[in-house]
Amino acid sequence: MMKREVMEDSITMNGGDGPNSYTQNSKFQRAASDQVKVLLSNTIQEKLTIENTSNATNQQVFKIVDLGCSVGPNTFACVQTVVEAVEHTFKTLGLESELPEFQVFFNDNVNNDFNTLFKALPLDRQYMAAGVPGSFHGQLFPKDSLNFMHSAFALHWLTKVPEEVTKENSPAWNKGRITYVGSSHEVLQAYTEQFLKDIKAFFSARAVELINHGLLAILMPCRPEGTLPSDSIVMHILEVLAFALTDMAKEGLISEALVDSINLPIFIPSATEVKKVISNIENLTIERSEKIYYLPKKLSTPEDVRFCTVHVRAVTEGILCKHFGPELIDEIFERYSKKIEEFSKTLDYAHVEKMENLFLLVKRNAI
């Protein structure tokens, strides 16, 4: 059994289905997943190896997992795309009478709101569902047990904040900031090394769990080639939180030490960085690689600013609440909203032309 990497703070998105929940505020992620729906379906149909979907022990059960599923509804749409693509492949090959049963595992960290997830399961689903709590940076399933694995907008989360950036006597101490944007070379290096360690652990685990010729589809944010990690607009938008927190510290609402000690465990890589790691994992090959470009919605109206604010809140509130306490959360995001509006008028924001996501289809080769 592989050693499991436990996410230090067990990062989870806001649960429930209220106004600040991830359920209500993940439209940005849903739009990006919808953008690659046809690509995902077509790639499955091109690359799926049918003869390896069954054996004498599992009796035609096609096993799928969504890694980093959160609370829905996006995970259900992705799973449905996969199921339909597999069924279409069987039918195209004249194997309609041999359609498998589908078993879908929904995975996320142990603190994920699985209750909300399972309450929202589609009533007309064509699969049997199960939850699998635990970090996807380690092995979660028996070896050679899964036909298809999927993960969308989860791999930019690290297992933990690099220890070096949290220590006051370290060259990488990240005082006054919550990401590596605008930080020293030492801070950036610490984040990069943590990401490379985590992503290697992720793909190494998948190489064990997939059956021979099993497939893994990845959709994740990335930054344009030739740019620095700190150039990512995603990270700039998150770093704006630090501006709000610093103001609150100056006003005595929170301590400066608390602000200096919080960092977000997020890293936006380039496609090259991710693919280089995969190339060094035995038995894995990249079958398809596509950069998905899109124009971000400009923050030109109060509604645009609100949209950005609630989406950031849905993914960061848990971290902030644990660090500063729940009583300050509304104040933090009221200030953040104003800071985002200010940021939208700066040159850093004006230079944003397009953003990128990376789509990968990876196959485990026969040993």
Image (cartoon, rainbow, N blue to C red):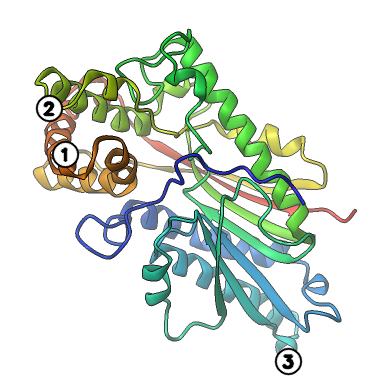
Q: Which residue is mark 1?
A: 328
Tag 1's secondary structure?
A: helix
95 over 181 or under it: above or below: below
Q: Earlier in the sequence, mark 3 or mark 2?
A: 3
Q: How many marks?
A: 3
| The one of 289 and 107 positioned closer to us in this rendering | 107
Q: Residues within 10 Å of mark 2 (few under 14, many from 20)?
A: few
Q: Which residue is mark 3?
A: 97
**x 82%, y 42%: residue:** 282
**What mark, if any, has residue 253 been given in the picture?**
2
Estimate the x, y position of residue 66 in percent, counting from the top left: 55, 61
| The one of 120 and 278 positioned closer to us in this rendering | 120
> What amino acid is labelled 3 in the image?
Ser
Q: CB of mark 1 within 8 Å of CB of mark 3? A: no
202 over 349 or under it: above or below: below
**What mark, if any, has residue 121 been given in the picture?**
none
- Specify whether 267 is left or right of 64: left
Say if residue 105 shows up in the picture: yes
Estimate the x, y position of residue 251 in percent, counting from the top left: 9, 21
Say if residue 226 shows up in the picture: no
Q: CA distance from mark 2 to mark 1?
A: 9 Å
**x 83%, y 53%: residue:** 365
Q: CA distance from mark 3 to mark 2?
A: 66 Å
**x 31%, y 41%: residue:** 322
- Specify whether 133 is left or right of 15: right
Nearer mark to the viewer, of 3 and 2: 2
**x 55%, y 54%: residue:** 151
